[in-house]
Image (cartoon, rainbow, N blue to C red):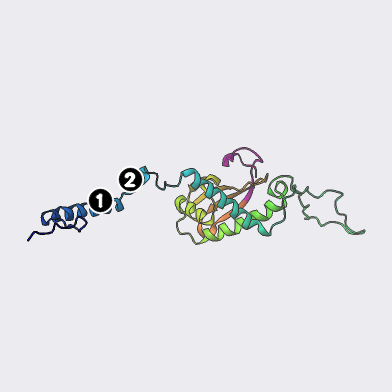
Amino acid sequence: MRRTPAPTDTITCCPRRLRPVLAMTALAALTLTACGAGTTGAEKLSAGGPQSTPAATVGARSGAAFTEMLGEVARSCPSIAPPEAPPAGPARTLPAGQTPPDDAIEPVVPTAGPEVELNARDWCAGSLHEERIARALWDLADPTPAKVRTVLHDLGYVDERIHGLRRSGTATRFFLDLREKGGRLCLDGSAAGEQTVVDKCVAPATGPFKAGERKE
């Protein structure tokens, strides 16, 4: 009896000796996949991954935050206006029959300094800056320049506006350039614990700020 040949469309199986080879091939593929998932940060950067933030961008963000802080402090102050001129006109006279006392002191009208050269907005904002800075420095033990700088940073003042920061005896002196929109406001500070003093000063309207050449 003749055997009928096997159909040509039957499913054939891999010989047993090929199975270990296929298993090793699959294992190698999985290993390569895992290696790809563990790509280092340097490789990602070289392949076009996310880059670090440029220093210029950080500086721009700091400048924007500083400008925002200035606006927030001066929010309750009047709008910018030219400086008010000192009072003029005839001196006040005494009623008829009265004479000024011998020790009377004639009031002196300021002709220079913050009272005259700062506009109403700068004067108001300067007073607010004085208070917030002095409060932050009153409780500072051993106010070194580094500690004072840290406090000023925490309040929102940036290095570009901090000048003349130096130790003077037991105190640390500093200046702040707070000019904006044509203003001339600056602050002259002395951090010395409970003897901390922060006063307004007048900076040149234009040009770089120089602590040694400020107008007071």
* Between marks 2 and 1 in the image, the one whose residue lies nearer the viewer: 1
Check the picture and name the quadrant holding the N terminus.
Answer: bottom left
Taking the magenta stretch, the answer to whether it contains residue 47 is no
Magenta residue span: 200-214
Main SS class of the magenta portion in the image: loop
Name which quarter of the figure residue 71 lies in.
bottom right
Q: Which label's residue is closer to the chain start, 2 or 1?
A: 1
Tell whether 19 sits left or right of 196.
Answer: left
Mark 2 crowd level (few <14, some 14–19, many ≥20, 10 Å Cα) = few
Type of the residue with mark 2:
Glu
Residue position for label 1: 32
* Location of residue 191 in the rendering, given as x and y in whole percent from the top left corner: 52, 54
Residue 165 visible within the image: no
Q: Which of these two is toward me, 160 or 12? A: 12
Q: Which of these two is toward me, 184 or 61? A: 61
Name which quarter of the figure residue 94 lies in.
bottom right
**Distance CA(mark 2)–CA(mark 1):** 16 Å
Type of the residue with mark 1:
Leu
Residue found at the very far right of the displayed protein: 96
Residue position for label 2: 43
* Location of residue 138 in the rendering, given as x and y in whole percent from the top left corner: 52, 60
* Location of residue 97 in the rendering, given as x and y in whole percent from the top left corner: 92, 59
Residue found at the very far front of the displayed protein: 1
What residue is rendered at 42% in x and 47% in y? 52
Q: Secondary structure at mark 1?
A: helix
What residue is rendered at 72% in x and 53% in y? 79
